[in-house]
Amino acid sequence: TPAEYIRNFCIIAHIDHGKSTLADRMLQLTGIVDAREMRDQYLDRMDIERERGITIKSQAVRMPWTMEGQAYALNMIDTPGHVDFSYEVNRSLAACEGAILLVDATQGIEAQTLANLYMALENDLTIIPVLNKIDLPSAQPEKYAQEVASLLGVEPEECIAVSGKTGAGVPELLDRIVSEISSPEGDLDAPSRAMIFDSVYDIYRGVVTYVRVKDGRLNPRERVAMMSTGSSHELLEIGVIAPEPKPTAGLAAGEVGYLITGVKDVRQSRVGDTVTSASRPAPAPLEGYADPKPMVFSGIYPIDGSDYPALREALDKLRLNDAALQYEPENSVALGFGFRCGFLGLLHLDIIRERIEREFDISIIATAPSVVYRVITDGGEEVTVTNPSEFPDGKVAHISEPMAKATLLTPSEYVGTLMELCQQRRGNLQGMDYLSEERVELHYDLPLAEIVTDFFDQLKSRTKGYASLDYDLEGEQEADLVKVDLLLNHEPVDAFSAIVHREKAYSYGLEMTKKLRNLIPRQQFEIPVQAAIGTRVIARETIRAVRKDVLAKCYGGDVSRKRKLLEKQKEGKKRMKTIGRVDVPQEAFVAALTSE
Ligand code: GDP
Ligand code: MG
């Protein structure tokens, strides 16, 4: 298709606002999926089903659409919905000329949508505002059209009202995509340059890479080079998704599609990188490439120590599909052998945790997430700390912590409670905008460390779930931070050391000593549980001594019952960790880490 008849667009929407359902209607109306094959959330299901030995993602679906007798190709590009993946979102947006801003007409816009909208505007995309679910009696399209219009600086009449469910308004929307979004520009005769906006590992085919060709043309069987690494590969297959993968005779400037080179690991085909021809390479890559950088670190340990090799294998497999996941072996007195892992953010951590448990069936425990600190010692040495155990023991001159620019969107009645929460979390108010009388946008500078410790749960519980949060990482600030250690019978329990703000050290110490006192069974001697900064104890609890006699309950009766109990106690002993001469069942540590 000549570039002038191509339109590349994405849909920006909050989860549940109806993106998948709208996509279904588009597939149906454009005729690429007929009524017989149609099922709900067609593209989502393809992700899971892995048909025909290729992991199809809904990343870039090509749909034909005819307007005023002219045939067009509409490429719908999928974007991930969450803050942790904002770089991937940014690259998906950079592959488009326009975006549909899809808003549930019963809910209004949410913070995440807003953040992606701003990113789309920064990428100079044409925005088509759409209110969805107008078939619902509770829909208030006029009200939210006002809100969206004032946000975009357009007239409310420019918002189009649709129902992804009934299909109402969807043909008009497809026409507006053609008439309002500009066709892609690019130099057909220049050396080829294609931007990678996603890459997925497939067990049969290796990595499937999704690209937007910006200049020139990529042809099957030619050798291509990845410009960030210089590595070159043969193009084994190139094509479009419509909605199954269809090999084509190449992709030219303006087009969107997939390519396969046989590489085995997504780190060899990185989002943001530029693909060029190896025989006639472009002089410079496209702008905007960045290496994924983990921002949140956590120790991951198998609950059953014998699962350690399986855990390693699981991480190795997950990394094939996730260029941002980092890990290295780590050893903890309390938790045994495990891995120190780096993630883009909390959601990324949750996804990996869940996949290890579900797909690989390994029970694991994760230590409290930590961010990356830059510590300058009195000796002038700089240390990067991603783990409390790396915190320098001696005198510390400066500590810098990463900062986030946070946007909170809330019904106005919760502004007070949210400001209080942000205040407690060392936030700095940067501004406040009323989207309407009822909805307010708050801007805060917040330390990332404060966001990663249950901020999101607090936000939701304080606002009955109505507020939403988004953040961008930006810069760092100097902060008065200390490392708090937890001591059991005067020995540190490594998994519980934490880097916290000096003003919160005391309450952290108090909370953790209480928790451990309640979870650790009494022993034959008295055990102090202490929290300390260096050698200074800031909190103390005591586990009182008990004469633990498992036979006491049996009143000298049944012998076989006694034996059973003794066996059982021995069994229990095996899974004990000994710290400071204290026997602690691993469950106690696990419980203390999970009951956050
Ligand atoms: P996504 O998370 O943005 O992909 O949203 P989905 O397409 O999965 O839709 C979320 C929920 O809203 C589902 O239960 C859909 O059936 C429902 N839904 C989506 N669009 C409409 C619509 O236009 N009208 C009605 N009544 N429900 C809709
Ligand atoms: Mg969906």
Image (cartoon, grey):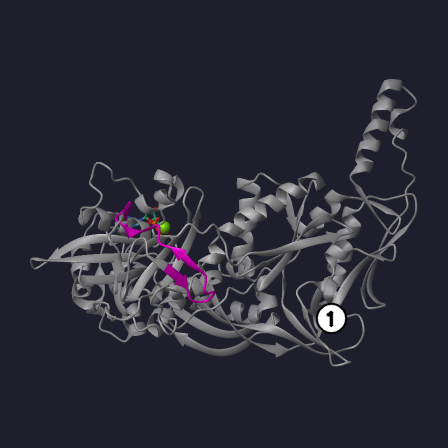
Visible residue check, residue 18: no
Horizontal side of 491 relative to 270 (left or right) equals: right
Q: Residue at x 29, y 45 (%)?
A: 244
Report which residue position mark 1 lands on.
482
Foreground residue, 246 or 299?
246
Image spot of residue 463 (x, y percent)? 49, 61
Q: Residue at x 27, y 76 (%)?
A: 153
Foreground residue, 517 or 368?
368
Q: Quadrant of the C terminus?
A: bottom right
Foreground residue, 480 or 427?
480
Q: Residue at x 90, y 42 (%)?
A: 546
> In the rendered structure, does residue 411 fall within the stretch colored magenta?
no
Visible residue check, residue 538: yes
Q: Residue at x 49, y 57 (%)?
A: 267
Horizontal side of 140 relative to 284 (left or right) equals: left
State the extent of the magenta-drawn residues as a range: 224-246
Image spot of residue 99 (x, y percent)? 29, 64
Q: Secondary structure at mark 1?
A: strand
